[in-house]
Image: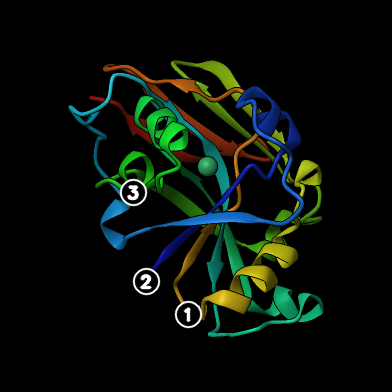
Amino acid sequence: MKIICIGRNYAEHAKEMKSDVPTEPVYFMKPDTSLLREGDFYIPDFTKDLHHEIELVLKISKAGKSIEEQFAHKYYDEIGLGIDFTARDIQAKCKEKGLPWEKAKAFDNSAPIGNFVKKEELGDLKNINFELKINGESRQIGNSKDLIFSFDKVVSYISRFVTLKTGDLIYTGTPEGVGPVKIGDKMEGFINGKSFLTLNVK
Ligand code: MG
């Protein structure tokens, strides 16, 4: 399986990163070794500025290539919550030099993933609330209504370039409020007020 992540998909996050709001989806990938399904997260030794990015995640349920946007909803059946951990200091250097982001984004365990639900259970997919709390304090609050590119749009767009397969995950982008994590932090993610992910930082 593969993990595809959308960058800058919420305007307020693009602004806080001092990036332009994109006119077409920006994506990058993480390998399957990035996935962290259970257990604690250990901050890697190569970064001094590891940031959390809470994101809604689509689970691909059917293989597809060049999917039309109007049919894209048939290609994902579950939605969950994940964290796109980012070594912000390394990413800044990559950006400066125009280099790829993999070193900053695609390291081992950089993609913790929580529970999934059938998308029907979430009601209106254009109005999904999600939140990240750290040590009980709210850090990021987002709503899918603020997506620049909708779920269907990103599925359709990515599939023009890359065949999507059953089990692939699409991290759909993070809202504003990204920031550093530190050893001892207890992270908890919520969708529509319900806990979907917990993670201890070590
Ligand atoms: Mg992200």
Task: Give, as a three-letter code, the residue at label 1.
Answer: Lys
Mark 2 secondary-structure assignment: loop
CA gap between label 2 and label 1 equals 7 Å
69 versus 145 height, above or below? below
Q: Residue at x 66, y 28 (%)?
A: 141
Mark 3 secondary-structure assignment: loop
Closer to the N terminus: mark 2 or mark 1? 2
Q: Which mark is residue 165?
A: 1
Closer to the N terminus: mark 1 or mark 3? 3
Relative image position of residue 57 (x, y in whole percent): 55, 54
149 versus 188 height, above or below? below
CA gap between label 2 and label 3 equals 14 Å
Q: Which mark is residue 1?
A: 2
Closer to the N terminus: mark 2 or mark 3? 2
Side of 113 relative to 45 (left or right): right
Image quadrant in which you'd find residue 2:
bottom left
Q: Residue at x 21, y 31 (%)?
A: 44
Quadrant in the picture for the C terminus: top left
Q: Are marks 2 and 3 in contact (CB under 8 Å)?
A: no
The residue sitting at the front extreme is 97
Relative image position of residue 95 (x, y in whole percent): 46, 36
Side of 24 relative to 61 (left or right): right
Image quadrant in which you'd find residue 45:
top left
Q: Which mark is residue 106?
A: 3
